[in-house]
Amino acid sequence: MDFGINDAANIVSTKLKSWLEALTSMLPNIVVAVLVLIAFYFLSRLMKAGSRKLVSRFSDQAAIIGLFSTIIALVTIAIGLVVALNVLQLTKAVTSLLAGAGIIGLALGFAFQDISANFISGVIMAFRKPIVVGDIIETNGYNGFVEKIELRSTVIRTFQGLHVIIPNKDIFQNPFTNYTRTHTRRIDLEVGVSYGDDLDKVTQVVEKAVASNSHLVDGQPVKLVYEEFGSSSINFRVMFWIEYDPKKPMYLEAKSEAIKAIKKAFDANDIMIPFPIRTLDFGIKGGEKLSEQIETKQMKLLPKN
């Protein structure tokens, strides 16, 4: 029994001595590894501060600035960790960490494809700035003011006061209209006049009426073109350019003013905008004549003897 206890104690003692010798031999490497980690930690703080200043030159969004600065700081620390493990001669651990990170990244990429697409679209939009907060845009069937641009989605407040959250991928990959980028717009009005009116007179009356619009752009004449022979009218399009401020309802005001001016001018010059005309034919082949239908109804209403 004593022999077994002594033998076990010797084995433990031998192991502890070997570990102590290994620790003693690795102590300089451990110290260097710790110093490397400390140095890279402070370096990551410097890199984070520098990256914030650099990214802020291209984007004014706090989320984008914070994201990129944090990523750069984490990458710096990860490089320091790899260097420290190499100092400790743990190359297999470094290989395992890199392989594990690659597998995890691949799995997350497949699992969160839509989130990744929205995120990448948000990052690209933050740098290219096709839209900014306050712009009036039309996208995916919605019109309104851009209230917030986040990494995953964009918030639009419609003209009716509703808040719509649209994924950045849908904005980035689909056509959209930014009304804030232009300061002039063309208004197209479709009007019809009766077949009995003089078209040359109509042209003069309409151009004169629209030329009095208070929102017209200087140097841009009013244009009128006749487009088709309609069922009850000759249809034409009148086009004119206006000064445009997206933050004011100038487009609707100019359009409304033009409609009222044209209607007033038509009334003053005896020009008619005809009502739609429908012709009902009850005498077609296979049908019944209207006179016969009336006679039948009258016979049913007569008193019976």
Image (spheres, rainbow, N blue to C red):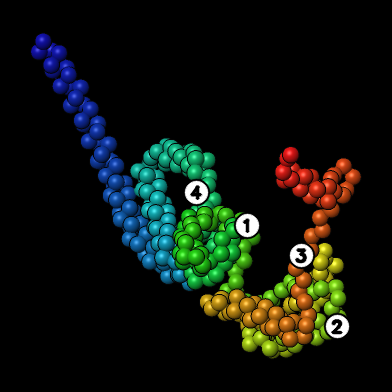
Q: Which residue is mark 3?
A: 276
Left or right: 140, with 115 as reference point: right
Left or right: 203, with 177 as reference point: right
Q: Which residue is mark 2?
A: 200
Residue 69 pos. (x, y %)? 41, 61
| Dot 2 crowding, Cα within 10 Å, few <14, some 14–19, many 20+ | few
Secondary structure under the numbered disc 2 in the rendered image: helix
Residue 28 pos. (x, y %)? 29, 47
Q: Residue furthest top?
A: 1
Q: Which residue is mark 1?
A: 174
Kindly tell me whether residue 34 is visible in this rendering: yes
First in sequence: mark 1 or mark 4?
4
Left or right: 190, with 57 as reference point: right
Kindly tell me whether residue 91 is visible in this rendering: no
| Dot 4 crowding, Cα within 10 Å, few <14, some 14–19, many 20+ | some
First in sequence: mark 2 or mark 4?
4
Q: Residue at x 29, y 42 (%)?
A: 26
Q: Are marks 3 and 2 in contact (CB under 8 Å)?
A: no
Kind of residue indicated by mark 3: Pro
Q: Are marks 3 and 4 in contact (CB under 8 Å)?
A: no
Q: Which residue is mark 4?
A: 115
Secondary structure under the numbered disc 3 in the rendered image: loop
Residue 229 pos. (x, y %)? 85, 67
Kind of residue indicated by mark 4: Ile
Tell me how far mark 2 sits from mark 4, CA to CA.
Answer: 60 Å
Kind of residue indicated by mark 2: Asp
Quarter of the image for residue 183 reads bottom right
Q: Residue at x 90, y 45 (%)?
A: 285
Kind of residue indicated by mark 1: Asn
First in sequence: mark 1 or mark 2?
1
